Protein backbone atom coordinates (compact mmCIF):
# COMPACT_ATOMS: atom_id res chain seq x y z
CA UNK A 1 0.00 0.00 0.00
CA UNK A 2 1.26 3.46 -0.96
CA UNK A 3 -0.01 6.61 0.73
CA UNK A 4 -0.87 9.13 -2.02
CA UNK A 5 -1.70 11.97 0.31
CA UNK A 6 -3.50 12.35 3.62
CA UNK A 7 -6.84 11.47 1.98
CA UNK A 8 -6.10 8.47 -0.25
CA UNK A 9 -4.22 5.21 -0.06
CA UNK A 10 -3.37 3.17 -3.17
CA UNK A 11 -3.27 -0.63 -3.20
CA UNK A 12 -0.60 -2.51 -5.12
CA UNK A 13 -3.10 -3.22 -7.90
CA UNK A 14 -3.73 0.50 -8.43
CA UNK A 15 -7.12 0.82 -6.79
CA UNK A 16 -7.93 3.39 -4.15
CA UNK A 17 -8.27 1.72 -0.76
CA UNK A 18 -10.12 4.43 1.10
CA UNK A 19 -10.80 8.10 1.25
CA UNK A 20 -10.92 9.62 4.70
CA UNK A 21 -14.21 11.44 5.26
CA UNK A 22 -14.93 14.29 7.61
CA UNK A 23 -18.32 14.89 9.20
CA UNK A 24 -20.00 18.26 8.84
CA UNK A 25 -22.98 19.20 10.99
CA UNK A 26 -24.87 22.34 10.08
CA UNK A 27 -26.91 23.95 12.82
CA UNK A 28 -29.65 26.53 12.41
CA UNK A 29 -30.05 26.05 8.66
CA UNK A 30 -33.13 27.93 7.51
CA UNK A 31 -35.95 25.55 6.58
CA UNK A 32 -36.44 27.33 3.27
CA UNK A 33 -32.81 26.73 2.28
CA UNK A 34 -33.00 23.09 3.34
CA UNK A 35 -36.13 22.59 1.23
CA UNK A 36 -34.40 24.13 -1.79
CA UNK A 37 -31.41 21.81 -1.38
CA UNK A 38 -33.73 18.87 -0.85
CA UNK A 39 -35.65 19.68 -4.05
CA UNK A 40 -32.41 20.07 -5.98
CA UNK A 41 -31.16 16.75 -4.62
CA UNK A 42 -34.37 15.05 -5.70
CA UNK A 43 -34.05 16.48 -9.22
CA UNK A 44 -30.48 15.18 -9.43
CA UNK A 45 -31.34 11.80 -7.85
CA UNK A 46 -29.01 12.43 -4.91
CA UNK A 47 -29.40 12.45 -1.16
CA UNK A 48 -29.33 15.83 0.56
CA UNK A 49 -25.85 15.04 1.91
CA UNK A 50 -24.60 14.11 -1.58
CA UNK A 51 -26.10 17.30 -3.01
CA UNK A 52 -24.43 19.47 -0.37
CA UNK A 53 -21.09 17.78 -1.09
CA UNK A 54 -21.65 18.35 -4.81
CA UNK A 55 -22.45 22.04 -4.28
CA UNK A 56 -19.43 22.55 -2.03
CA UNK A 57 -17.17 20.71 -4.49
CA UNK A 58 -18.32 22.91 -7.36
CA UNK A 59 -17.90 26.06 -5.30
CA UNK A 60 -14.34 25.19 -4.32
CA UNK A 61 -13.07 23.39 -7.44
CA UNK A 62 -14.36 25.81 -10.06
CA UNK A 63 -12.64 28.81 -8.56
CA UNK A 64 -10.48 30.30 -11.26
CA UNK A 65 -7.32 32.09 -10.30
CA UNK A 66 -6.54 35.34 -12.02
CA UNK A 67 -3.33 37.14 -12.67
CA UNK A 68 -2.88 40.81 -11.91
CA UNK A 69 -2.05 41.10 -15.60
CA UNK A 70 -5.69 40.24 -16.40
CA UNK A 71 -6.62 43.64 -14.94
CA UNK A 72 -4.46 45.59 -17.39
CA UNK A 73 -6.56 48.25 -19.09
CA UNK A 74 -9.64 47.55 -16.97
CA UNK A 75 -11.61 50.78 -16.51
CA UNK A 76 -9.42 52.80 -18.84
CA UNK A 77 -12.47 54.44 -20.44
CA UNK A 78 -13.32 56.03 -17.07
CA UNK A 79 -9.96 57.80 -16.99
CA UNK A 80 -9.65 58.65 -20.70
CA UNK A 81 -10.58 62.36 -20.26
CA UNK A 82 -8.82 62.87 -16.91
CA UNK A 83 -5.42 64.50 -16.58
CA UNK A 84 -3.63 62.13 -14.19
CA UNK A 85 -1.21 64.68 -12.70
CA UNK A 86 -4.02 67.17 -11.98
CA UNK A 87 -6.12 64.40 -10.40
CA UNK A 88 -3.26 63.28 -8.16
CA UNK A 89 -2.50 66.86 -7.12
CA UNK A 90 -6.16 67.45 -6.25
CA UNK A 91 -6.30 64.24 -4.21
CA UNK A 92 -3.10 65.13 -2.33
CA UNK A 93 -4.44 68.59 -1.46
CA UNK A 94 -7.47 66.87 0.05
CA UNK A 95 -5.26 64.94 2.47
CA UNK A 96 -4.31 68.05 4.42
Image (cartoon, rainbow, N blue to C red):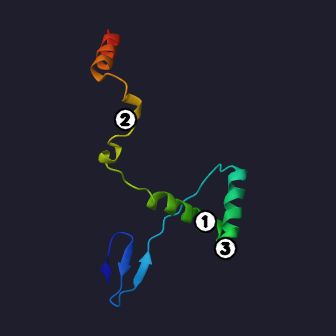
Residue at the image position 29 percent from the left and 46 percent from the top = 69
Question: As drawn, which residue projects farthest toward the bottom?
Answer: 13
The residue that mark 3 highlights is: 45
Name which of mark 2 and mark 1 comes first in the sequence. 1
**Which quadrant of the view contains residue 87?**
top left
**Which quadrant of the view contains residue 3?**
bottom left
Name which of mark 1 and mark 3 comes first in the sequence. 3
- Mark 1 crowdedness (10 Å alpha carbons): few <14, some 14-19, many ≥20: some
Measure the C-alpha gap from mark 1 to mark 3.
9 Å
Q: How many marks?
A: 3
- Mark 2 crowdedness (10 Å alpha carbons): few <14, some 14-19, many ≥20: few
Measure the C-alpha gap from mark 2 to mark 1.
42 Å
- The location of residue 4, given as percent across then percent down, is 32, 75
Residue at the image position 59 percent from the left and 62 percent from the top = 52
- Location of residue 40 with respect to 29 vertically, above or below: below
Residue nearest the viewer, comparing 57 with 74? 74
The residue that mark 2 highlights is: 76
Q: Quadrant of the C terminus?
A: top left
* Tag in front: 2 or 1: 2
- The location of residue 63, given as percent across then percent down, is 43, 56
Q: Quadrant of the N terminus?
A: bottom left
Do the CB atoms of the residues marked 2 and 1 lie less than 8 Å apart?
A: no
The residue that mark 1 highlights is: 51
- Please, what secondary structure does the residue beneath circle 1 have? helix
Position of 46 compared to 96: left or right?
right
Name which of mark 3 and mark 2 comes first in the sequence. 3
Residue at the image position 33 percent from the left and 71 percent from the top = 5
- The location of residue 38, given as percent across then percent down, is 69, 62
- The location of residue 32, given as percent across then percent down, is 72, 51
* Tag in front: 3 or 2: 2
Residue nearest the viewer, comparing 87 with 92? 87
Question: As drawn, which residue projects farthest toward the top?
Answer: 96
Amino acid sequence: MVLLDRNFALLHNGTVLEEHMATLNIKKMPDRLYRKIQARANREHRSVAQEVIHILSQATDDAMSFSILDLQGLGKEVWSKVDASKHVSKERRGWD
